[in-house]
Amino acid sequence: MNVAQILAAKPTKGEETRAQILAAAVEVASTGGFESLTIGTLAEKTGMSKSGLFAHFGSKLELQIAALDESARRFTEAVYMPALKAPRGLKRLRTLFENWIAWPMQLKGGCPIDAASREYAHKPGPMRDAVNERQRLLDRELTKTVQMAIDSGELSAETEARQLTFEIVAIVLACFRGEPLFGGDEARKRARHAFERVILDHQA
Amino acid sequence: MNVAQILAAKPTKGEETRAQILAAAVEVASTGGFESLTIGTLAEKTGMSKSGLFAHFGSKLELQIAALDESARRFTEAVYMPALKAPRGLKRLRTLFENWIAWPMQLKGGCPIDAASREYAHKPGPMRDAVNERQRLLDRELTKTVQMAIDSGELSAETEARQLTFEIVAIVLACFRGEPLFGGDEARKRARHAFERVILDHQA
DNA sequence: GACAAGTACGAACGATCGTTCTATTGTGTC
DNA sequence: GACACAATAGAACGATCGTTCGTACTTGTC
């Protein structure tokens, strides 16, 4: 059985329901955070019994981690992968940014990864470790994308990739914060404004 | 009985214990968020009985709101009030920023207001309303401070106060996010770097 | 069609949740 | 020192939490 066959393999019944559960879990975590994930409410939401749902994960912690992984997978799918189709450099960076500030719109609440980051940043445990690892990975990938724009000459050679990464992340976070305060449209408008100014700064 | 007498009045026993409870509550919320506040753990932490503690608030919701108010009070005390001693304009703005990124250091976990913001932004209810109201108030005050720096001529007359406010908030949020990822010192370093560049941009 | 494995259910567990009582202790006032 | 009242404790409630267990029902394989 080769790779193509594995990928094309029809998912078993268990895999299907597991995917359904995780879809509901991401939705819940998106609005109420990962700590609000409970076996009971999730079972009700999916029309399953508590024990039937529970059997797919073995513990609540594993359910939370699976939901986090699923959130990350969706982020990659909706934000990062499409940006890879754009040509390296500033264009790709801009696409990445645009996809990023837009992707909570396809969710019920806010960005689940952002939610997880706040929830577990100061609470030691497996969830914090998993979240921080994801965040660092995200930073690394974003820094790479920034570096490409430097290498291509579109951004000034003196640009410090990690500092610019920090500033782009900052704008995205403020955009997410602003959404419930003055609406998504206004938040994204200010975010784009800030982004363009930051980019302009690093082109001199 | 005039105002001075009221302020000088020795707090009753009940007020004292209430203050102790709220101190513990802020600490808990700082690390685990406001949703992790439970009557039981808080009672244990303060050495009281559940019912004795409960009687001070009447419901969990009121306890959460009281903890949020106390957090805001501390923020004002530690960040905003000291900045008012600095002269209006850029100096005050800079002091405000510096106090802001420093104030989670006097807490056990992170900024409780930031935590509350994420927890309730997408969950309708009294807590969300209270949090959003606080956030808007914060934005207004910060915008005022920015505007003073514009009026004094230290920032360019073309500066849009609300946009600059957005960008400063962005930097602070990224600073808080960065703290568990690459340490508070490095996070604040990058934050200051970003802040100075933003300010420089608006002086042209 | 039998058989094994995978999948889901229902009932129950101890623990903890927020909350409500009643009773007891402590505090401040005349 | 007695009295009124604020403050706290203790026990118990129904609900829900995560989890375990035994059992039934599906599914895919020979």
Image (cartoon, coloured by chain):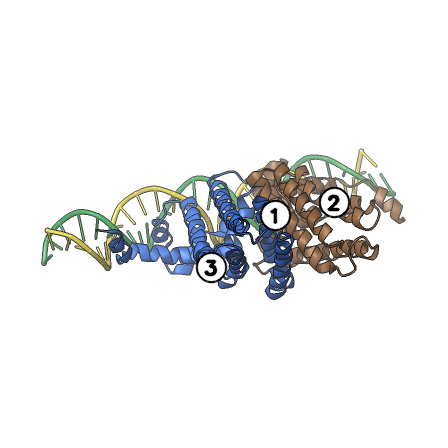
Chain colours: A blue, B brown, C green, D yellow
- Amino acid type, residue under disc 1 in the picture: Ala
> What residue is pinned by disc 2?
B79
Q: Determine crowd level at label 2: few under 14, some 14-19, many 20+ residues with C-alpha closer than 10 A.
A: many
* Mark 2 or mark 1, whichever is nearer to me: 1
Closest to the observer: A199 or D26? A199
Residue at (49, 50) in percent of width and height: A34
Residue lying at the far right in this picture: please name it: B2
Of the two numbered discs 2 and 1 on the same chain, state the one appearing first in sequence. 2
Q: Using the image, name the chain to which the residue with label 2 belongs.
A: B
Q: Are marks 3 and 1 on the same chain?
A: no
Percent x, y of residue A102: 53, 61
* Mark 3 or mark 1, whichever is nearer to me: 3
> What residue is pinned by disc 3?
A86
Question: Residue A19: which quarter of the image?
Answer: bottom left
- Amino acid type, residue under disc 2 in the picture: Val
Asked whether the viewer can see residue B45, the reply is: yes
- Amino acid type, residue under disc 3 in the picture: Ala
* SS label for mark 3: loop
Percent x, y of residue B98: 72, 43
Q: Are marks 2 and 3 on the same chain?
A: no
Q: Using the image, name the chain to which the residue with label 1 belongs.
A: B
> What residue is pinned by disc 1?
B174
Q: Determine crowd level at label 3: few under 14, some 14-19, many 20+ residues with C-alpha closer than 10 A.
A: some
